Image (cartoon, coloured by chain):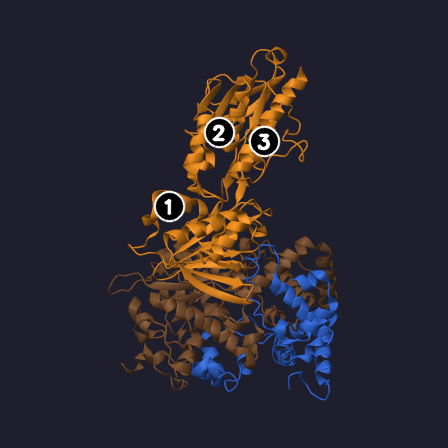
Amino acid sequence: MNPDKQSVGKRNTVAVIGAGPAGLSAASALAALDFEVHLFEKESREGGKLNQYHQLFPARESASEVMGELLISVDKENIIRHLGLGVNSIKPSDGGWAVHHGDGEPIRSDAVIVATGFDFFDARLKEEFGYGIYSRVITSVDLEKKLNEGRETLLHKGTDPAAIAFVHCVGSRDEQVGVSYCSRLCCITGIKQAIEMKELFPETKVYNFYIDMRAFGTGYEELYRKAQEQYGVRFIRGRVSEASEDAECRIRLKAEDTLMSRPLKVSVDWLVLLVGMRPGCSPVQTDQSFLGSDNPLTGNALPGMPGVYSAGCCSGPMSIPESVASGRSAAFQVIDHLNSKQ
Amino acid sequence: MTKYWKDYQKEIAEDEFFYVRSCIRQNFFPGAENLFIDILRNKLGKAIFEDADHTTCTGIGYHSDIVPLETIMTVVARQFALMKERGYKNMIVSCVTSFGIYSEILDLWKHDPALKSKIEGYLKEATGRTFEEPGNMVHASDILYKFRQEIAAQARYRLVNHETGQPLKVVDHIGCHYAKTFPERGVGGAEFPQVLTGLIRAWGGETVDYPERRHCCGFGFRQYILQPSRGYSISHSRTKLESMKPYEPDLIVANCPGCSMFLDRWQYTLEETDGSVYGPANEKIPVLTHEELAGLVLGYDPWEIGLQTHQVPVEGLLEKMGIPYDPEKKYTDRSGRVIGHPEKIHNSICHESR
Amino acid sequence: MNLVSEGDDETLIRIMSEDTIWYCGQCMSCKPRCPRGNIPGVVIQILRMISQKNGYFIHSAMGRQQLAVKRSIGHNILETGYCIHPTRVNPDLHPEQGPVWEWMSDNAPEVYGRFDKNYDASGPGLLRRISPESLEELDRIFEVTGCKNLWETLETESEKQIDGKFAKYD
């Protein structure tokens, strides 16, 4: 698979926009095959959303360890990292692409991989849950941060929480907020975090309110089973209609239990909203939508942009392993593209 | 830039209003609407007109399922026709159910112009009239919200305990049909409507956020109308009252006439049933409509604006606010002659003995 | 919602013949919350109308109560131009309204008259007497738009018994 340096000429340059798991994997793969890689990252450090996580599903790997591995893989002399530098746009240039960033002359590259990732759904838009209004309503992302900070961040006046509830599908599968798709990874996140709560607070009641349990991946269904059998997490199939705060600042939920065909009300100490994955901003489009592909079933080429490929969550919700695989796949497609141009 | 419903403001007209009255508000809060008209004309200098030929919108009939959609649409079209004939474009609706219905009908006509034509035909056939949609259609509480600072500037009393200086704790209750059906029709949207919160804060009070704040008062239309299902109605109000009790509210204000009526009456009934009382110091919680709240703040006489028609006595609140009142004038007619007294008011602090 | 979208008429007719559709209080709290953008409260309105128009309502106790709604609210509308009127909310039938209501109802002209000289009179004002011409227009609207037909159906269907009983659960 090594590109013949003779056939592709002097080292080709590829720009990778975004240094999250997908971008890092793409950069690493390209660098291993002797490409010069310009890796752009608008934040001051690499890693993307991986920096916000505590442990990953389903096997509870440490996010920071996985981060470490990915970083080592890009520690190569032919990867030039541009940290804290966002890309504004890319324009066709001389058979390749000119990457316009915020700091000086555009960098010309033979191909581009867009790995700009996603945004989490803004939970304040789901008004009825009171995120941003009630202090004990947090998102799954907030919870990962608290898990990184330590158990004490979940105590109230030194006491263990008596009950914690998770709400699935916040900002996914919901016409009220204009997001009709499923974000794929929130269910397994909810299962994982429920288990993490039970591990920290074995006596605490943990409720997960779901519509469907989408535990599709390898090891996911098993983790779901484990959450029920080993940890006693109560999974309730039904929507939470609203959350409000009582006089002790606990959160009161109104929900429906469709398995028991009845409404229910429960007070909890933390309400965790499993927020969906929304398209992020990327320099190749003006609106915020997931990037499409010229050949969706078999490749990641962006329509109408020869030599530009997407990798990772900028084209749809993906897990870490899926993003990594997507990055490597995009790298291969770049190589294939450049080879065929000869 | 992301927009949140909480911050949503809607367009509310400035002047030249066509006012349509509310069946329930006229029946159960007979002082309220003329007070509203007086505030608009004499405190805010606005033009507000009432057409003597307007009728009920038939909303209660519609929501209790005995008035079909096309009938209510044609009745509403007639109201719009009267408005057009009088040369007005801005409508103020006193009832919240009506407001919901006007919103629903305007929305349906927008999506289905053929339906609107059909109604034009019906109205013409039945009455010979033609109509135009209002340029602006808002609820009466929206108007007070819009001019809350002007009212605050003229306030003689504030929503403050005049002895302790503490703001009064006010529960605001928004009628379901104000914003739940069309959030874009309500100031602040469906979940955290701001129309009454704005008034309360502008006039010195503090709002209470309690768990059942967004819950329906339980009118239920047919559920209240029919005696066998009246329990539905009372149990929802009870859920709300129980939920607000720990916060010790001084006052409840509601913009829907039905809600005001139920939260007022059901406190009496619940006390009769099992002795439950939900206000601080074992008193019931006075319930006011938005115009009554404005009236008290502006210094109108409590009995002239009809507070004696409430089942929960308001004297405790008047004293907290430092508003003087004459017990002798409570149950009198226009000329000052005492008409008689309501019998047996249980357990309420009745200050007539002073 | 599923039944309605599946078009399972047989089951729908059964449901429209039971108490089920009559429990809803029409608060529309369902509308801002449904993630599919449905409005169960409105679907229930439609089912109730079909139930009444087709006579299914007579098969349940709660359905049969619609006749009472028609004869109270319905008649109020055409006879007074209001859904509710102080002369038609009998305190004996509404003890929950409390003693203040009883006083208001017993002394209506004086109580209401205090707030508006024009109470129950012609011209604008509190609970003005709505003109005969306006009432006639309402009446014709109710005729032309089919409401009178609905009311006729409510009356005639309610006369019917089922297996010698008036309600399924006698």
For the residues labelled 1 and 3, the Cα–Cα distance comes to 34 Å
Residue C158 appears in the picture as rendered? yes
Residue B203's mark? Answer: none
Helix, strand or loop at label 2? It is loop
Residue identifier under label 2:
A19
Quadrant into which the C terminus of chain A falls: top right
Q: Callout 3: few (<14), some (14-19), or many (20+) C-alpha neighbours within 10 Å?
A: few
Left or right: where C108 falls relative to C83:
left
- The image shows residue A31 at horizontal and vertical percentages of 52, 21
Among the two numbered marks 3 and 2 on one chain, the one whose residue lies closer to the N terminus: 2
Q: Callout 1: few (<14), some (14-19), or many (20+) C-alpha neighbours within 10 Å?
A: some
- At 47% from the left edge and 23% from the top edge, which residue is drawn? A102
For the residues labelled 3 and 2, the Cα–Cα distance comes to 19 Å
Chain identifier of the brown chain: B
- The image shows residue B298 at horizontal and vertical percentages of 37, 63
Instruction: Provide the chain ID for the residue under circle 1.
Output: A
Q: Could you tell me the amino acid type at mark 2?
A: Ala
Q: Chain C hue?
A: blue
Residue A146's mark? Answer: 1
